[in-house]
Amino acid sequence: MLHPALNSARACIFDAGGTLVHPDWPRLSHIAEKVSGRAFEPSEMGRAFGEMLRAVGIEMQREGFVLADDMKRPHWTFLRMYGALGLDEVTCESVVKDLDGAHLERHLWCGVDSEVPRVLDELKRQGLLLAVISNTEDGRLIDSLDASGITDRFDLLIDSHIVGHRKPDAAIFRLALERLELDAAEAAYIGDSYVHDALAAQAIGLRGILLDPLDLHSESVCPRVRSLSELIKGSA
Ligand SMILES: [Mg+2]
């Protein structure tokens, strides 16, 4: 049995970062420690990152989704996260410089929860098309999925940097639907950003689902799941 939001759906479309793939927290901690002498626990970074994204969502909704200047920089999310963890500005800049090099060697978003392959395989087994729509800063969605070992499970990948539209713009969701040859109501979209993923998808008629592992979004009008395995709860 699939999650009720997937009832008779023909496709399940995923956000990538924070949904299918996660930052390589041990590497991010190691780099911070090398530069600043401070190491962070993955859970500590995950929470700071989640809270930062929630605040960014609220801020962007208020500003009409105009990107602030610092959001045009590579790794701006990590820059803000390290700041929230108490590193000063100069240290944050040094850490992010080292992140650049590390990211070139291997995509920083290469962590994948152990449940993910199983969830994708079960959805596939139940006949759903699987796709990804991701906002990237550098057009490297495929590197991220390759490093995570899950690329071959998808029927369609849409990278904002390549197609020239970004979530929450309806155009990027419509492009995916067009390529999948589906109507909006036939597809579910799941992501960890309330405004860029769940609400944006729902606004154009997809079944928006919010992945909210830390229970940060009690305001959500979209169904929420704590983990991707809830999509296939009761199945195989
Ligand atoms: Mg995300």
Image: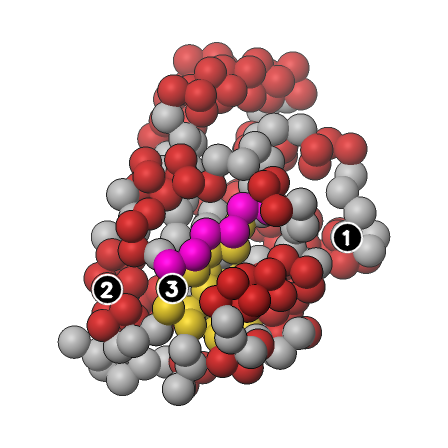
Task: Tell me where residue 176 appears, x and y as whole percent.
Answer: 54, 62
- Which quadrant: the C terminus? bottom left
Task: Give the distance between the C-alpha atoms of the residues marked 3 and 2, in whole angstroms.
Answer: 10 Å
Who comes first in sequence, dot 2 or dot 1? 1
In the rendered image, which residue does mark 1 sit on?
A: 65
Mark identifier at residue 35: none
User: Is 63 left, or right, of 122 in this rendering?
Assistant: right
Who comes first in sequence, dot 3 or dot 1? 1
The amino acid type, in three-letter code, at marker 1 is Phe
Instruction: Determine crowd level at label 1: few under 14, some 14-19, many 20+ residues with C-alpha closer than 10 A.
Output: some
Helix, strand or loop at label 2? It is helix
Instruction: Determine crowd level at label 3: few under 14, some 14-19, many 20+ residues with C-alpha closer than 10 A.
Output: many
Q: Does residue 91 sit above or below 185 in this rendering?
A: above
Q: Give the range drawn in magenta.
A: 155-160
The answer to whether residue 171 is magenta is no
User: Is 210 left, or right, of 9 in this rendering?
Assistant: right
The amino acid type, in three-letter code, at marker 3 is Leu
Task: Tell me where residue 122 appears, x and y as whole percent.
Answer: 24, 70
Q: Nearer the viewer, residue 69 or 94?
A: 69
The amino acid type, in three-letter code, at marker 2 is Asp
In the rendered image, which residue does mark 3 sit on?
A: 130
**How many numbered circles does the render carry?**
3
Q: Do the residues labelled 3 and 2 touch (CB within 8 Å)?
A: no
Helix, strand or loop at label 3? It is strand
- Which quadrant: the N terminus? bottom left
